[in-house]
Image (cartoon, rainbow, N blue to C red):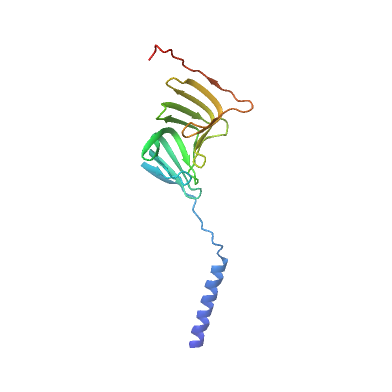
Amino acid sequence: MLRLALLAMAVVVAALLALALLDEGRVEVPEAVITLRDTQVTLYPRADPTAVWYFSSPRVEYVPDRQEATLFTIADGRRTVGGETDFTLDSERVTIDSSDNIRGEAMHAFLVEDEIDLYMEAKGDRLVLIDQARGRFEVPRARMSGPDLGESVFEDMRISFDFTEFEAGGPGTVGYSEFIIRSDDEP
């Protein structure tokens, strides 16, 4: 009887060992979309540890297997550094990827300190990208306007979050600017 019990136990242990060796350590994540309603999202980008992003969205969809969240109808997004808002962001739809980058078809950012509006649009299959690691906007087509700035249109624009580094253009791109010049007598 003891011999039979030991034999049965050896068979069970061998079967469990075989099952453990067959498992390749992959975790199957089901194809699913998690939908949240009336959500407050806070993003702490790993690549930009001094910044905190805040969003309010009536609908957020999270896809676990891609680790992406899509936020809809953002009217009050903002990026803060040291508790101070440096720019606001609104958009009909943005996606935050697993690297904390934000991309979308169209976005509007407002640089608070310089009072500059930046309207960003996709072009073709190239989306607007807010690159956290580089601290910049990468924009296929952009319109900038503000007090004393007039309006400027740029294609293939890359501009830092603080607007101190700026690149635009390239082969086949279009750009124009309108500047407002005031005399000493004007306020």
Q: Quadrant of the C terminus?
A: top left
Residue drawn at x 40%, y 29% is 113
In the rendered image, residue 51, in percent from the top left (x then y), is placed at 42, 41
Residue nearest the observer in this picture, 153 or 11: 153
Residue drawn at x 62%, y 28% is 170
Residue nearest the observer in this picture, 131 or 128: 131
Task: Give the residue furthest to the front.
Answer: 184
On the image, which quarter does residue 112 sit in? Answer: top left
Res. 1 in view: no
Report how many numbered discs are placed on residues in the image: 0
User: Position of 140 compared to 61: left or right?
Assistant: right
Identify whether 5 is placed above or below 108: below
Residue drawn at x 42%, y 37% is 72
In the rendered image, residue 121, in percent from the top left (x then y), is placed at 51, 29
On the image, which quarter does residue 155 sit in? Answer: top right
Residue drawn at x 60%, y 25% is 173
In the rendered image, residue 185, in percent from the top left (x then y), is placed at 39, 11
Residue nearest the observer in this picture, 110 or 92: 110
In the rendered image, residue 147, in percent from the top left (x then y), is placed at 42, 21
Res. 186 in view: yes
